[in-house]
Image: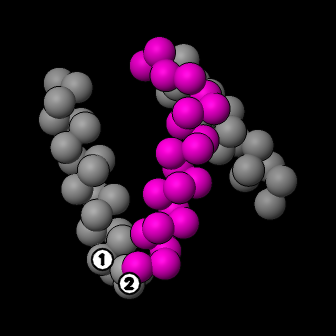
Amino acid sequence: MKDIKKREIELLAKICKHNDIPFKLATELISTSQKFSYENVSSSKRVNEYQEIIDYHSKNNQ
C-alpha cells in the first residue's frame, strides 16, 4: 500500500510541475473534493462525475 501511495504522490508532483500548479494546492483540492463527493453521492455517480471532469479537461488540452 505504501508503494501505491508513493507512486500517486510522484505522479501528482509530475502533473503539477508539468501544468505549473502548486503541489500543496492540488493535494488540498483533491482531499476536499474526495471528502465532499464521498459524503454526498453514490459510487456510480462519483465515477460518472470523475469521467466528465477527465473528458472536459482532456478536450480543453487538445
Which sits in the foreground, 36 or 11? 36
The crowding category of the residue bearing disc 1, from other C-alpha atoms within 10 Å (few below 14, some 14 to 19, many at least 20), is: few
Residue that badge 1 annotates: 45
Q: What's the magenta region? A: 19-40
The crowding category of the residue bearing disc 2, from other C-alpha atoms within 10 Å (few below 14, some 14 to 19, many at least 20), is: few
Position of the C terminus, as image quadrant, is top left
Which sits in the foreground, 37 or 17? 37
19 to 37, vertically: above or below = above
Identified at 58% across, 54% down, the residue is 31
Q: Secondary structure at mark 1?
A: helix
Place of residue 23 in the rendered image (x, y in percent of width and height, measured from the top left): 61, 28
Label 1 is placed on what type of residue?
Answer: Lys
42 to 52, vertically: above or below = below
Which of the 4 quarters of the picture holds residue 17?
top right
Q: Left or right of 49: which side holds 6?
A: right
Task: Inspect this view and state whether residue 29 appears.
Answer: yes
Q: Left or right of 17: which side holds 40?
A: left
Place of residue 48 in the rendered image (x, y in percent of width and height, measured from the top left): 27, 68
> How far apart are the alpha carbons under marks 2 and 1?
5 Å
Which sits in the foreground, 52 or 4? 52
Which of the 4 quarters of the picture holds residue 49?
bottom left
Residue 34 drawn in magenta: yes
Q: Main secondary structure of the magenta part?
A: helix
Residue that badge 2 annotates: 42
Q: Secondary structure at mark 2?
A: loop
Q: Which colour assignment does the render follow?
A: one colour
61 to 20, vertically: above or below = below
Place of residue 3 in the rendered image (x, y in percent of width and height, measured from the top left): 80, 49
